[in-house]
Amino acid sequence: STKILSLNTGAQIPQIGLGTWQSKENDAYKAVLTALKDGYRHIDTAAIYRNEDQVGQAIKDSGVPREEIFVTTKLWCTQHHEPEVALDQSLKRLGLDYVDLYLMHWPARLDPAYIKNEDILSVPTKKDGSRAVDITNWNFIKTWELMQELPKTGKTKAVGVSNFSINNLKDLLASQGNKLTPAANQVEIHPLLPQDELINFCKSKGIVVEAYSPLGSTDAPLLKEPIILEIAKKNNVQPGHVVISWHVQRGYVVLPKSVNPDRIKTNRKIFTLSTEDFEAINNISKEKGEKRVVHPNWSPFEVFK
Ligand code: A2P
């Protein structure tokens, strides 16, 4: 069964949760329902995934008591100035009274005046072609000052961040108005981007790390890595299992996304890697170099500094 980790609020968080980015409408509904019936108790969504209503409906239809499920959603970049309004809107779509964790999706605000149809994967630009990341009039410190008031409202049990670098976290923790240490930092992690330094930094500050795109996202080349295939064959499991087990063994939260019922179920069934196999996976990025696969277009932005 899935191990439980603790947040700095004292709340418990199941180590494996279902990711829902790119799970659309009915697929998201079915995936969440399948997962909850199978025993998952942790679901991760976001306002920008545009599936909060289906996720919420599946939670309701599952019959699983609300208090047994850990639900995370995220503040989109166009609403950094109004996180409580955004959270209210998310709760309404989810049909829930509260979420367990509310994350700042990115450490960058997008100018709400210019963004209509946000495409999460493209570099956000204004009509004249200039960048829409609004770093002159706003920064994430201000967003955090507003977000840290949210747990008091009861609308979220905890607040955290996502896509924060070590420098971003240092700035946040050192800021004058900071009262709360983020409960979590959700970032891209997989064997091609192991993020050891960031993980150690978060650990030292009591911030739980959560891995998104733990399999390297859609059509992951990672699942075709010879080493991964070899370890899978040797242990008589699928390559996806090898990678999820590697994450779990590293001790943080892992959020594999799937809409396929078989993969949803098996993704929770991890096994223990031998020290040798564990090290072999650690060596992949050392040999091949690190690779950000999910948001290559965002890397030129200040957000990854
Ligand atoms: P699908 O939803 O059809 O299962 P990530 O979590 O890194 O974003 O990866 C998700 C991608 O990997 C999705 O395309 C998902 O497709 C696929 N996937 C999920 N679980 C597995 C698995 N155990 N083995 C192979 N591919 C998987």
Image: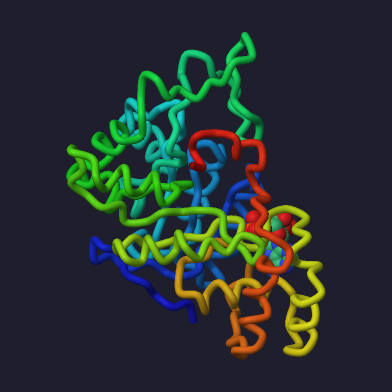
Q: Which percent across, then down, holds residue 7? A: 31, 64
Residue located 26% across and 52% down the image: 181
- Would residue 33 be visible to someone looking at this image? no
Furthest residue toward top:
128
Residue located 31% across and 49% down the image: 159
Q: Is residue 51 left or right of residue 66?
A: right
Q: Which percent across, then down, holds residue 93? A: 45, 37
Q: In which quarter of the image is ligand 1?
A: bottom right
- Would residue 74 be visible to someone looking at this image? yes
Residue 189 in the image: above or below residue 73? below
> How does the figure colour the protein chain or chains?
rainbow
Write down the quadrant of residue 194 in the picture. Answer: bottom right
Write down the quadrant of residue 65 in the picture. Answer: bottom left
Q: Which percent across, then down, holds residue 261? A: 68, 65
Residue 114 in the image: above or below residue 161? above
Q: In this view, does 45 lie to the left or right of 67?
A: right
Residue located 26% across and 63% down the image: 8
Residue located 41% across and 66% down the image: 200
